[in-house]
Amino acid sequence: MLQVQEVADGLAHLAESICDKCLMSETCGDIPMCGDIQLLKQAEELLKMHP
């Protein structure tokens, strides 16, 4: 079973990877996918706060 820290690290890596590949970086936050990325980042923070 995965540890909480491994899941948090995976979510952080996934969010960074998607953002790095995004062609819309100049308009960050104005497209629906950005909301999904924010959700990943929020989940990461929750997991770090509540191990």
Image (cartoon, helix red, strand yellow):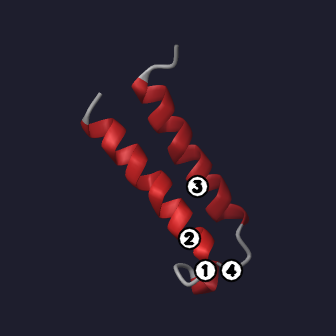
Residue drawn at 49 percent across, 27 percent down? 6
Question: Tag 1: residue type?
Answer: Ile
Residue position for label 2: 34
Callout 4: helix, strand or loop?
loop
Q: Residue at x 59, y 86 (%)?
A: 27
Q: Who comes first in sequence, dot 3 or dot 4?
A: 3
The answer to which of marks 2 and 3 sits earlier in the sequence is 3
Give the distance between the C-alpha atoms of the residues marked 4 and 1, in whole angstroms. 8 Å
Q: Residue at x 53, y 43 (%)?
A: 11
Callout 2–callout 3 Cβ contact below 8 Å: no
Q: CA distance from mark 2 to mark 3?
A: 12 Å
- 45 horizontally vs 15: left or right: left
Evaluate if marks 1 and 2 touch, with contact meaning CB atoms under 8 Å apart.
yes
Which circle's residue, 4 or 1, is located before the other in the chain? Answer: 4
Secondary structure at badge 2 equals: helix
Residue under label 3:
16
Secondary structure of the residue carrying tag 1 is: loop
Return the x and y of residue 45 as percentages of the image width and height: 34, 47
- The residue mark sitting in front, 2 or 3, is 2
Picture quadrant of residue 30: bottom right
- Quarter holding residue 37: bottom right
In the picture provided, is 38 more to the left or to the right than 36?
left
Identify which amino acid the numbered label 4 is placed on: Met
Q: Look at mark 4 in the image and give the residue it sits on.
A: 24
Residue 4 horizontal/vertical position (percent): 41, 26
Name which residue type carries label 3.
Glu
Q: What percent of the width, then of the height, locates residue 5?
A: 42, 28
* Mark 4 touches mark 1? (CB < 8 Å): yes
Q: Which mark is residue 31?
A: 1
User: What kind of element bears circle 3?
Assistant: helix
Say how many tags the image has: 4
Sooner in the amino-acid sequence: mark 1 or mark 3: 3
